Image: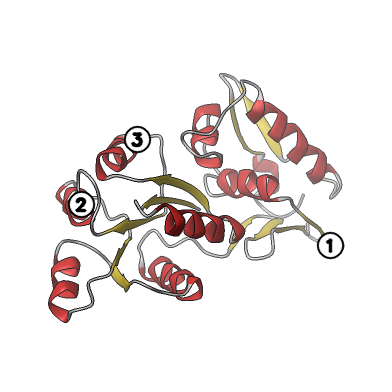
Amino acid sequence: MKVLLVEDELDLGAAIERTLNQEKYIVDWVQDGNSALNYLDNQQAQYTLAIFDWMLPGQTGLDLCKRLREQKNSLPVLILTARDRWEDKVIGLDAGADDYLVKPFRMEELLARLRSLRRRSPQFQPQQIQFGSLLLDCDNRVIYWQPVHKERRSIRLSKKEFQLLEYIMRHPWQAVTRDQILNYLYEVDAERISNVVAAQVRLLRRRLSELGCDDAIQTVPGGGYRLNSVYADGTV
């Protein structure tokens, strides 16, 4: 799950980023509205949620909300603000925000509101993903393999292994490219080395082989990856 965080208070932004990373979110954090527009206009950046502060340098959080809705973009947005009057809440919601959190707040409440947004959103991502005999438990980062008439086996994945497999399993019948994986797994401004995706795929394949799934992820000519369709009916 990838989040765009737009917050110009450095201490607060760092605390939110740290909390979200601990909860397995991938976070792009920027400190002004104009930078946020550039990130939103980057079609390779695939966000699940957005957190906008109301008052920002450049474009405000409300400006960003309005821009999204004018573009028919349904990305769920949580607005952060010190404004606690009911009239301000109405203004924020009318601008296109999905929820409104008043500062100061506890990180537990922020996480709860993000979970609520995901449940209500048409982009809601289920906490279990199944592809035939493969089942990914997203809450616990565990992958299960249970073909018909065989014993169920499981392993727990590292954070990056889980994020890579989650992304591939959410696109089960299509090849995902190296660039798509890079933009999902890493922050936009993160340092990226040329072979990081291939190396991460090798590590994931090695872990899946511990289940007996040596060929679960196929390499597609042209540099993409997808799930092997032989696992789809659950017999393998």
Spot occupied by residue 13 in the image (x, y as percentages of width and height): 43, 55
Q: Compared to 26, does 136 lie above or below?
A: below
- In the rendered image, residue 162, in percent from the top left (x then y), is placed at 66, 50
Residue 206 shows up from this direction = yes
Identify which residue, 204 or 67, lies in the foreground.
67
Residue at the spot 47% in from the left edge and 75% down from the top edge: 106
Which numbered disc, 2 or 1, marks the residue closer to the eye?
Answer: 2
For residue 113, the mark is none
189 sits left or right of 146 in the view: left
From the viewer's perspective, tell me whether residue 148 is left or right of residue 37.
right
In the image shown, does 99 or 104 lie closer to the viewer? 104
Q: Residues within 10 Å of mark 3 (few under 14, many from 20)?
A: few
What mark, if any, has residue 43 been given in the picture?
Answer: 3
Relative to 110, is 62 above or below?
Answer: above
Q: Amino acid at mark 1?
A: His
Mark 2 — residue?
Answer: 60
- Seen from the viewer's position, the closer of residues 190 and 215 is 190
Q: Which residue is mark 1?
A: 149
Callout 1: SS = loop
2 and 1 marks in contact (CB < 8 Å): no
Binning the other alpha carbons within 10 Å of mark 2 as few (below 14), some (14 to 19) or many (20 upward) gives some
What's the residue at 84%, 50% (across, down)?
211
Which marked residue is nearer to the observer: mark 2 or mark 3? 2
Find numbered disc 3 in the image and state the secondary structure of the residue it sits on: loop
Inspect the image, locate mark 2, and give the three-letter code of the amino acid beneath it.
Thr
Q: Nearer the viewer, mark 1 or mark 3?
A: 3
Q: Earlier in the sequence, mark 2 or mark 3?
A: 3
Is residue 175 visible to us here?
no
Give residue 11's quadrant in the image.
bottom left
Q: Amino acid at mark 3?
A: Gln
Q: Residue furthest bottom?
A: 86
Give neighbour class at mark 1: few <14, some 14-19, many 20+ (Cα, 10 Å). few
